[in-house]
Amino acid sequence: MTGRSQNDVYAVVSLGLWRLREDIATILGGRIVFWPLHPPKGITAFVGWGGRPSGLRARTLGARHDRPVVIVEDGFVKSYQPGPEEPAHSFVVDRKGVYFDIARPNDLAGLMNEPCVDPNELARSASLIDLIRANRLSKYNNSPLLSTAAAGIPGGRQFVLLVEQIPGDASIAGALASLDSFSAMLIHAREHNPDKQLVVRAHPAAGDGSILRRAAEKLGIEITVPGRMNPWPLLEEADSVYTVSSQLGFEALMARRPVHCFGTAWYAGRGLTVDYGKQQALQPMSLEQVFHAAYLQYARYLDIHDRSPCRAERAIEQAIIIRDQRNRLPRKIYAVGLSPWKRLALDPFLKGMHGRAVHMRTMGAAENAARRKDGCVAVWGSERVLPADVPAIRIEDGFIRSRGLGADLVMPSSIAIDGGHVYYDARGESALEHMIATMTFDAGLLARAGALVDEIVRRGVSKYNLPAMPEMPDVAPGILKILVPGQVEKDASIRFGSPEVKTNADLLARVRVLYPDAYIVYKEHPDVAAGLRSGGAQPQGANFVARSGDILHWIEWCDRVETMTSLTGFEALLRCKHVGVHGIPFYAGWGLTDDRVSVPRRRRRASLEMLAAAALILYPSYIHPVSRMPCSPEDLVQEFGLPRAKDFGIVRRSILMVSRVVNRCAVRIRDMRV
C-alpha cells in the first residue's frame, strides 16, 4: 500500500482499467471511479495504462483539469500467460511517467538515482535473483522448458541470442529506438560474431510481424528461430545477448551474460550493459541495486488468492506454484464424460500450457481431436477404457478435497491426475505408488512433508472438513477403542482396491473376530449418512454406530482404525494411530500399516514423511477455494483451517438446491448400474 488516504478518488479512463478496479484500489489505497461518470472536482488523479491510449488520455485529462496522473503497468513478474483472464502477480505504479519511456522523468529512474546501500536489502535482492534464475521465472511463464538442442539449435557452435520485440510496442519508442535499431543490432551481431550462430528469441505475440526475421531476410543474414520455449536456457547458454529494450535483457543480466543494448533500456547505462543507444552518463549500480529499485521498490505485489498486498517473495513463490502445476499438462486437454457441474469444478485443474480444456461429448470425438491437435484425452475415474493410440489421463478426487461433500456439489480443491491406474486402483501401479516405491526423497522435501503433516494435524484438516461435533461414547479405561469407517460399497476404491473384503458388514465382522473384546465404533460414510448414496446392508457387531461428525473427531477418539481402503486410514497414520488394512489402499504395504492382504510388489519400507511427501505434495494438484487458482498444499491447509461463512444470494441458493437434487439422482442411477 502507498499509505495514501482512503478518501483519495482515482478516475480510471478505460473499461480495461475498470475491470482491474479492485486491484488498482488496493495498490493505490483509494476509491476507484469511472471517468466521465464522476465530476472532475472530486478526483484526486486520473489513472491510465502505460503507453496505451488510456495512458495518453489520462495525461490529457490531467492537464485539462489540473490533476495529477498515475500510470499503471504490468510488473516484471506478471502472470502465467498474457491476457486479461489471468490475475496479475504485480503491477508498477508511476506518478511521473513510466519506466520504459526515458524521454520523460519516471519514478523508477528516481529510485535508481538513489540506489539502495542497505546490505540486508541487497542480500535479499541477491537471494531473489537466485530464486528467479533457479526456477527460470519470467514475466510470463506458460512456455515449455526445452534444452537448446530440443529447441532446434544445432550443437557444436557457440551462439549469440537476439531478442525480438513487438512492432509498435511503446517500449521501443520509449527507449529512443526504432525498427532500424533491430537491423543495426543484427548487423553488429553478425560482424562481431562471424563464427557463431545467430539465434532469435521470437516474441510470443510477434507472429508474422517479426522485425528480426524481416531484417534478416532483407540483409541475407542466416538466423535460427526456436519455437515457443522458456527463455532461460537460451539466456544461460548464449555467449552474449543482444536486445533493444526488452525485459529479457535484464533477465540475461541475472543469468550473468554479457548484454548489448541498442536502445536506452531502463537497466542500461549503469555499467552492467554494453550500450549503443542514446545513453546519458548515469550513476553506476550493481545488479542487486538495479533489481532492488525495479522489483522491490517500484513494483507492487498482490497475493494471487485474496488480492491483498504481499512481499515479492510471496508473489514469486505463487508464480512458481502456478507455473509448475499448469506445466504438468503440456498438451491440450480434451475431456469426455463430465457432467456440467464436474466441468465447472475441474476446469481450473485442467488448464495447462495450452489453455483451458475442451469438453467433448463422446470418447470418439475426444480421441480424434487429441490425435489431430497432439492433445491428451482426460476421463474421470477408472470406469472408462483409455484410448490406446493417443495420450490419456485419469482424474480423481485428491486427499484434501473440500469443505463439504462432493456429492453435495461442493467444489473440489484438490484432484489426482494419473495414467492407466489412479491411486485407489490396486490392479496395477499408479503414479503415486511408483513415486513411493522408487523416488529419492531429499532432506528438504522430507522436512517440508513433516511440517505439512504437523500443520494438518494442528489445524484439524481432513478430506471433507465437516463442522459437526459428535457425541462420543464413554468407554471404560483399558478397553481398546477401534474405529471402523464405512465406505460406499459400489465405489471403485472397493471394487478395484479390496480383493477380499467387499462390504462394510464383512469388514466389521472380521474386525470383531480379530478384536473380540474391543469397543468398536462403526462410522457411516458421510455420503451415506446424508442420504446421498447407499452403504449396503447395515453392519452388525458394532458397539456404537456414528452418523455425525467429521472423521477427525473419531480418529482422535480411537486407539486403532480398521478399514478396507478408506482414506481414513491415511489420516489416522498422519495422527500416529495404529491402522489395520483389509484391502490395498495406496498407503498399505510400505511397513506403516498392519496389512491383512499382502502386496508383494510393494517392497520398500517407507517413512511417514516419504508417504506424505508423495501423497500430499508431489502427486495431487491443488486449487485455492477463494481464487480458483493453483496453490500449494500448505496454502490449502491454512485456508481450510480458517472459519469462513458462505454468503450465497437467493438465486444461487436456489440453483444449488436444484442442482443438488439432480446430482443426487444422477449418483443413485450411476450406483444402480454398477
Image (spheres, rainbow, N blue to C red):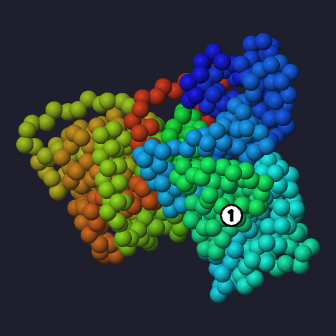
- Relative horizontal placement of residue 310, taking residue 529 as reference (left or right): right
Q: Farthest residue toward the left? A: 478
Q: Amino acid at mark 1?
A: Val
Residue at figure coordinates x 82%, y 73% from the top left: 187
Q: Is residue 36 above or below residue 375?
A: above
Image spot of residue 287 (x, y percent): 56, 55
Image spot of residue 294 (x, y percent): 60, 45
Q: Farthest residue toward the bottom? A: 156
Q: Quadrant of residue 557?
A: top left
Residue placed most toward the observer, 427 or 613: 613
- Relative horizontal placement of residue 358, taking residue 654 as reference (left or right): right
- For disc 1, the marked residue is 274
Q: Is residue 435 visible?
A: yes
Q: Is residue 451 above or below residue 310?
A: below
Number of other residues with Cα within 10 Å of mark 1, as a class: few under 14, some 14 to 19, many 20 or more: some
Q: At numbered mark 1, what does the secondary structure look like: helix, strand or loop? A: strand
Q: Is residue 61 above or below residue 458?
A: above
Image spot of residue 90 (x, y percent): 61, 42
